[in-house]
Image (spheres, rainbow, N blue to C red):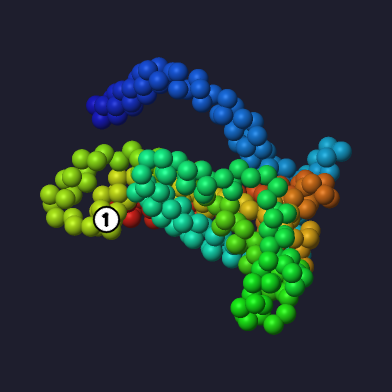
Amino acid sequence: MFGKEKSQYIEDSKFRYTMREMKKNSSAYVLALPYFLLFLFFTAIPVLISLPVGFTNFNMAQFPKWTGLSNFYTLFLADDVFLIAIQNTLVFAIITGPVSYIMCFMLAWLINEMPGPLKTVFTYIFYAPTLAGNIYATWQLIFSGDAQGPLNSVLMNLGIIRGPQQWLTDSRYILMCVIIVQMWMSLGAGFLAIRAGLQGIDKAGYEAGAIEGIKNRFQELIYITVPAMGPQLLFAAVMQITASFTAGDIGRFLTAFPSTDYAAHTLMTHAFDYGSIRFEMGYACAVCFFLFVVMLLVNNVIRKAMSGILDT
């Protein structure tokens, strides 16, 4: 009985401490309230609703009709395009996720080594692509399939190719082009989080490292910088993996829709096809729920792997 009372006392102490800290930082919670409300109504609630809707036949005009596991049976047993979308999404995520994460960290670290004014300039330069609106027209021009297209022209002048290639309509090249554009646009919230983490590291740690025998910047990076910014690295990893799994707009805007042989067709593209074009919302929700489960599992694996690395 004493053990239960002690456990209850500890839980009550934690609750009182949490409430005290929330009251102390009430102004911060007020400032964050608009974001939390938007996240609640436009992200959290739709994700929760997608599960029951995924078990229905819902066309946006009539009340949903319960169909059980019919949508999921169709996904895995009768929808060949869905299987192509899974393959494309996995290839896309495996390549863009780790590469863009490493790019975020290395560029943030290099920028952090620059003088003050240059840090701001280069941070904006590398972050700007994520803020750009209609950037796809520029990339469509670069990947133009005629001989005067910038990429074709350069490669033909170098003798790498003999004739113009149809980069955005040939199924052999479409996914590669989409991956390139995605990595160019990938320096988003994760990049800024790492930049903030680098700026927040206590300089005394580097001084202590020099006393302990650290001799160069690479050793500082491995033994001081990386362990000191674990939360930012973990946040960036989750953001980059999430972005790589949910990419869909790039393929639709950069290539035709649907793309040749569904070469750029991802799970998000498949959900958009059924939800926004065919208005089969039950089927689209089944696709989204499957994607949500996959992302949840991958994020848990990444979190555990990153926590183990950072703890060591």
| Residue marked by disc 1 | 217
Q: Residue furthest front?
A: 157
Residue displayed at 72% across by 60% down = 141
Residue displayed at 18% across by 45% down = 207
Residue displayed at 45% across by 41% down = 120
Q: Nearer the viewer, residue 72 or 296?
A: 296
Residue 227 position in % (x across, y down): 29, 49
Residue 303 position in % (x across, y down): 42, 50
Q: Is residue 301 left or right of residue 257?
A: left
Residue 139 position in % (x across, y down): 68, 58
Q: Residues within 10 Å of mark 1 (few under 14, many from 20)?
A: few
Amino acid type indicated by mark 1: Arg
Q: Is residue 199 above or below residue 261?
A: above
Residue 22 position in % (x across, y down): 40, 21
Query: Would you identify the image quadrant in which residue 87 lies?
Result: bottom right
Q: Is residue 35 above or below residue 237?
A: above
Q: Is residue 312 above or below residue 165?
A: above
